[in-house]
Image (cartoon, coloured by chain):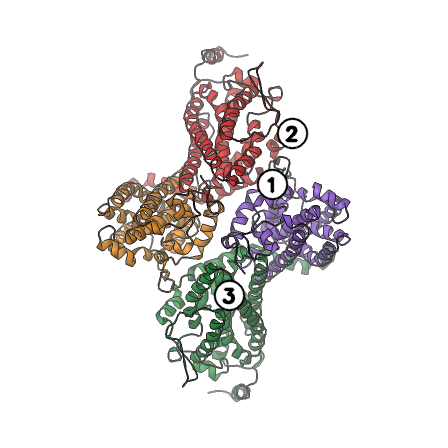
Chain colours: A red, B green, C purple, D orange
Amino acid sequence: MMTAPAQAEEASFEATLARHDRIEPRDWMPERYRATLVRQIAQHAHSEIIGMQPEGAWITRAPSLRRKAILLAKVQDEAGHGLYLYSACETLGVSRQELTEKLIEGKQKYSSIFNYPTLSYADVGTIGWLVDGAAICNQVPLCRTSYGPYGRAMIRVCKEESFHQRQGFELLATMMRGTDAQRAMVQESVDRFWWPALMMFGPPDADSSHTAQSMAWGIKRDTNDELRQKFVDMTVPQARALGVTLPDPDLVWNDEKGGHDFTQPDWAEFRDVVSGSGPCNAQRVAHRRRAHEDGAWVREAASAFARRQQQEPQQQEAVS
Amino acid sequence: MMTAPAQAEEASFEATLARHDRIEPRDWMPERYRATLVRQIAQHAHSEIIGMQPEGAWITRAPSLRRKAILLAKVQDEAGHGLYLYSACETLGVSRQELTEKLIEGKQKYSSIFNYPTLSYADVGTIGWLVDGAAICNQVPLCRTSYGPYGRAMIRVCKEESFHQRQGFELLATMMRGTDAQRAMVQESVDRFWWPALMMFGPPDADSSHTAQSMAWGIKRDTNDELRQKFVDMTVPQARALGVTLPDPDLVWNDEKGGHDFTQPDWAEFRDVVSGSGPCNAQRVAHRRRAHEDGAWVREAASAFARRQQQEPQQQEAVS
Amino acid sequence: GAALAAYCLMLGDDALVHSHRLSQWASNAPDLEEDIALANIALDLLGQARLLLARAAAADPSVVPALPAGSPVPPEDALAFFRDDADFRNVRLVEGENGDFAVTTARLLLFSTHRLALLKRLRDSVDPVLAAIAAKGVKEVAYHRDHAARWCLTLARGTEESRRRMRAGLDVVWPLHHELFRTHPVEATAAEQGFGVDPAGLAADVDVLLEQVLSVGGLDRPTVPPTGPLGRGAGRDGRHTEALGRMLAEMQVVARAHPTGRW
Amino acid sequence: GAALAAYCLMLGDDALVHSHRLSQWASNAPDLEEDIALANIALDLLGQARLLLARAAAADPSVVPALPAGSPVPPEDALAFFRDDADFRNVRLVEGENGDFAVTTARLLLFSTHRLALLKRLRDSVDPVLAAIAAKGVKEVAYHRDHAARWCLTLARGTEESRRRMRAGLDVVWPLHHELFRTHPVEATAAEQGFGVDPAGLAADVDVLLEQVLSVGGLDRPTVPPTGPLGRGAGRDGRHTEALGRMLAEMQVVARAHPTGRW
């Protein structure tokens, strides 16, 4: 039996959701709502951090200084997104440290797309165009998510992601105006990333375990299949503008439904990748673990120094 | 005052030297003879080991599979030479472990030539031609050195060095038959290595502190300047055959002395490099130190395993 | 011609790429003896690679990348230095960064155990060149396998630290192991036509040998999940890890700067 | 034109190469804040490099490597991606491998302290483009210097381990420090003609600032010997360490594979 104050709190929570208003960190919330948010925000934050790797691998090989600057700034933005999102998670009482541990122990997920390798510079463009494009479809509705800090972080993230998406498209468009070899590189890259991009919206609604509850709580605003359809419909004209062929011969406009019919990605592959058998799962987690462990002595030094500074505030002045 | 048996031992030692016969590990020898030998053999062994680095750096970039095989085999030979020479040193009662420690602590030297960087694939050829060429001039007389194990190690080393020298010459000759860019690469490399190669024979006789005693003991058979002259006279016709210009406008044949006149290298630079200021001193020692430290756990495991095998000999059989 | 060439590229690229990785140990090994041993193994594999790439080029000259007219670059080098990563046909196992000595040992153990089984059968190839390459290779790779097995055991039963690292090393390479035994259509054709070996048929034998090494070392079989393909392909289809592109950038830099060079 | 171009290449290559090394920290830094900070610094330096290389190309178009007819590669990229290591004019200090975070911190401290002093004077360049680049750069590099000094102090006064590493990091980079203050003939000309700065004149000021950081950190001035030139030249003469060639092999691989590519 609930106590009267608890009942009042729950009613207030439900009323906030019904008004499409925001839940804030100090508000009462059901434990499962909190846990679902932590899981989702952490996964999102981890995706930003792991997502630095496949693109970051090309910073040192960017073929023009302008592209090098754009890519470096983008990878930097991803670190920034990770920061906002870990902060949002911290408002729910979980520290960045705890979340990082879970990531490198393989106990929390990140977007499965980053378990695919980047094999050419065109992949930098394709990730911007298709992967960031898919991310935006997923994320724009999250700007209206019911948990305040998460929604506000998403507004900032989405703005930058749109910018990245346009930059990715622009890189591909430029390459398509280049040499035959460059055009072939773009097409090969799109061929590789199309199916994994479709997987980014998660399994078909019929198989999605979390969707219903998340929608009821206002954490999620659209189903996986709705978002996937939106992405396909948005992408087809862009592909045409680029002059690339999406690798699905059955992709056609369906007048009746007012959207495209398209082939589903290989969901068995998706399950394999999610459960750890993707081409890069081990590599990505090992990289993050190594970077984290290599940096431990620096973080320890910073903490020790900060403690010392608090104890001897006069020193601080002498220093600055 | 010496005791009678000590006098007899010394007389026998001197007699052996006078006969140009070999001193063997169990023979009596003066402490300074032993120390000089340890210093010289260790320096020689260290040179082989450090010498693996400048050439080894190009194994992964060798421009043909044949050259990759030749270079890999050469670097492997250098490790082998290091092994023989450390073994020769061990007959004088100093372990490889001790010598390695002294090397990575900067307490023992190696040939200053390896403190110069390798900056193009032509350097692999030039090191073979000029550096191994100079080494052979230095080392052939050492095959007749008075200490047996050293002399015998040198016989083996010299045979392989001659082979390396011919391979280096052959690489340069092939490149000289290639493109203009390749010919320019060879010339630039020879320009860089000529002076350091001349330094390999050590300072002019007038400034050489060890030569007189080493010659008296039959450790050394020729002076630095004699060997340098021999090297220059040997190299000039080879340079002509290759079609490269040695970077010394004053290098001319002197009929009277029956050898070439040539410009001395910059002995101030030589002193700087020997005393630690060469372009690569810090890098070479740091590389060796890192490799040694990275391998510590492996060497410890091998010792622990060997101890265990001795204690449980029946296990060994089960294994093999 | 085409199937034989494709098959030779697979075996040749395995040897070439693994040789390259092992050669990176030169001047970096735990001791001089190991510097020498790893260089030996790298040299053996490089020799196998050269013979196999030459055989591929002879069987189907169209596999050799085109170079500027008059370029003196021989076919083996055109194949090694002028193909992009997507044209390499090696399994992904051999292209990973070396890691520590335990990772290298684990990789060599898996690769050489497989390759020894393969070469033993390949001695009966109807292609006399392949049969001869295999006959020579068997002796070499038997030594590689012994060397790896001995180190695996030494590390497993050495110190606590070496045991921990040996386990971690096996965990790193194990996920890429199964790709060696996945029959590619080219390998199926090669087996059918009698010039090559279906690797699936080697799995059981190899497994027994590995199990033996693990059990003497007191090592559990790793439980890490296998690394999946990339879409419908893997290394044999030219679908590689990010490591191969980086490796080739270094390996090919001098050759590509001088496409008409003589070396 | 020629002296101005040569001078701009020196400052531009310093920025380009150091930026490249710092960019290698992306996704490898000790924490996210530092990932962001190092990327920021790398971006600032990359921006400076682009302006300086463009100025070099404008001042003397003959410094720009020739590319195939019709290549759309802009001058800044032709300079960055189509010169060989011997044509780079950066000091050797900036081209070394990153090492650990202490080595990177030490290198950034030495470089940014020097560069800040340099850019402050370069604001008075008679070349208005250089003066403008310097004015913008001063604000950026002041932040780089503060960042490096703060970390140097933090590590020096953090834990025993961090102090040990900070000392070792200083020992790694200190031998290459003096090259920054060696006046190259091009720099002498630049100072004479009023468009550039004689670096020898910066040494005393820079030294005072470094001494201050060292003393607050309780760090002794390293006693390691300086790294000598290579023959009669050093970085400013195109005589580099082995590290630069390896760095460029990676940096230039894509651009060189597509000499007529558009990016």
Distance, label 3 to label 1, CA atoms, is 38 Å
Distance, label 1 to label 2, CA atoms, is 19 Å
Contact flag, marks 2 and 3 (Cβ < 8 Å)? no
Q: Quadrant of the N terminus of chain A?
A: top right
Q: Are marks 2 and 3 on the same chain?
A: no
Residue at point 41%, 46% (across, down): D20
Characterize the local packing of mark 3: few (<14), some (14-19) or many (20 or more) Cα atoms within 10 angstroms. Answer: many
- Name which residue type carries label 2: Ala
Query: Which of A231/B172 is in front?
Result: B172
Contact flag, marks 1 and 2 (Cβ < 8 Å)? no
Question: Toward which corner of the image does residue A79 lie, by quadrant?
Answer: top left
Kindly identify which residue carries mark 2. Answer: A268
Label 1: which secondary element: loop
- As drawn, the label of residue A77 is none
- As drawn, the label of residue C239 is 1
- As drawn, the label of residue B172 is 3
Contact flag, marks 3 and 1 (Cβ < 8 Å)? no
Query: Which of A130/C162 is in front?
Result: A130
Q: Nearer the viewer, mark 2 or mark 3?
A: 3
